[in-house]
Image: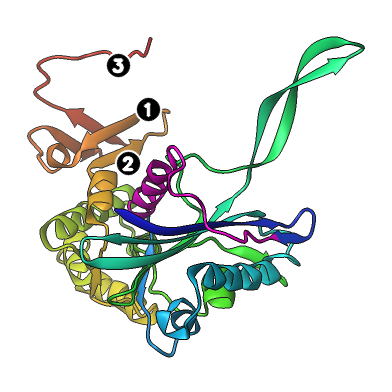
Amino acid sequence: MIIKHVILHVLDKNSGNLIASQDELDLNQPSLHEYIEKLIEKFKNSDYKTGQLTDNDDISSKISDSNNQSFATKATVLAEELFDIIAPSETIPAGDLLVIEFSEGVDDFFSILKLNFTPRYTHAVEYQDEKLVNNLVLNQAVLPAATQKVDEGIIINLMSGIYMLIEKKYLIDGHRTNYFSENFLKIHPENSTKDNIQVIKQAVKSVASKFDMPEHEVLAETQNTIFDTVQDDGEIKTSVIAESVFKGNVSAQQAYQQIMDTKQLESDINVPNTERIEKKYRLQRFKLDSGIEISIPMDIYQDKSKVEFINKPDGTMSLIIKDIESIINKFNS
């Protein structure tokens, strides 16, 4: 990564002021490059939304070189617009706005990251009655660590117009709103992978309830199918989910597909961050009514010679774990 420009503006809602920097950050500051690079890397490994900017999008003209504005001027205009949106809101947190222009390979990127403040205690050395006293002070404006996920932000590929977006909904005028995309950037991203999977889960649960199917079984098979299709094709295939989860039950498949049509979910959903989904779904996790929790690797779960759920005549179930050669206690010292 080659960092070209960085500027930091303070969105100080508590004092009601935007503290706009008049110059860019010195790129020679110790650890600055490492901090930014880790923020960007963490961003890319998050559950982000994607989309494609057009020349007609408002944000396109504001970050374009064709408007003959300096990087600092572009960033300041963006900070002023964002502050005007968040200042009246009681729910949107204050923070710093980190605006970055960088390149990777042959591509240039423009990034707008809102780093929400996190209250943290720090020490303060003071003198009381001529005695040195070390006190604890609550600092309300601590930036997130480089290893923490950015709550709100966008990374735009200046060559292609493709962007990655992370945002949170906040209560504005009585409605939970994605203000970062809708009010600030004025763009309409695609649903995130997490949002799409949530729709699929709710559809599967609804159909399973209607057709009296064990919820834990259909959800486990849904996760199994998502894991397989993402691993094989980089996509979630809703039609394959219907066939796998409701195998042999045409009515259930049709009910599921009707929900997909109502929710306007496409049959093939592209997953931009396949590594994250594969890592997240490689384990099947179950919690039993006895309080026992168990995690089963996906390949083991798919092998009935290793693990098997058995439905008993009295309505209860048994979980059998087979061919155990050794057991290691995972007690943490």
Report the residue marked by disc 2: 315
Q: Are marks 1 and 3 in contact (CB under 8 Å)?
A: no
Write down the quadrant of residue 265 in the picture.
Answer: bottom left
Could you say which is closer to the camera, residue 123 or residue 150? 123
Could you say which is closer to the camera, residue 115 or residue 5? 5
Q: Secondary structure at mark 1?
A: loop
Q: Are marks 1 and 2 in contact (CB under 8 Å)?
A: no
Q: Amino acid at mark 2?
A: Gly
Mark drawn on residue 292: 1
Q: Earlier in the sequence, mark 1 or mark 2?
A: 1
* Bounds of the magenta segment: 19-46
Q: Decide if residue 259 is on the left or right side of residue 282.
A: right
Q: Residue at x 47, y 82 (%)?
A: 68
Q: Residue at x 28, y 33 (%)?
A: 295
Q: Amino acid at mark 1?
A: Ile
Coordinates of residue 139 in the picture (x, y in percent): 70, 36
Q: Decide if residue 11 is on the left or right side of residue 240.
A: right
Could you say which is closer to the camera, residue 137 or residue 230? 137
Q: Decide if residue 313 is on the left or right side of residue 90.
A: left
Residue 38 belongs to the span the image colors magenta: yes
Q: Amino acid at mark 3?
A: Lys
Q: Is residue 291 above or below residue 316?
A: above
Coordinates of residue 143 in the picture (x, y in percent): 57, 43
Coordinates of residue 192 in the picture (x, y in percent): 38, 65
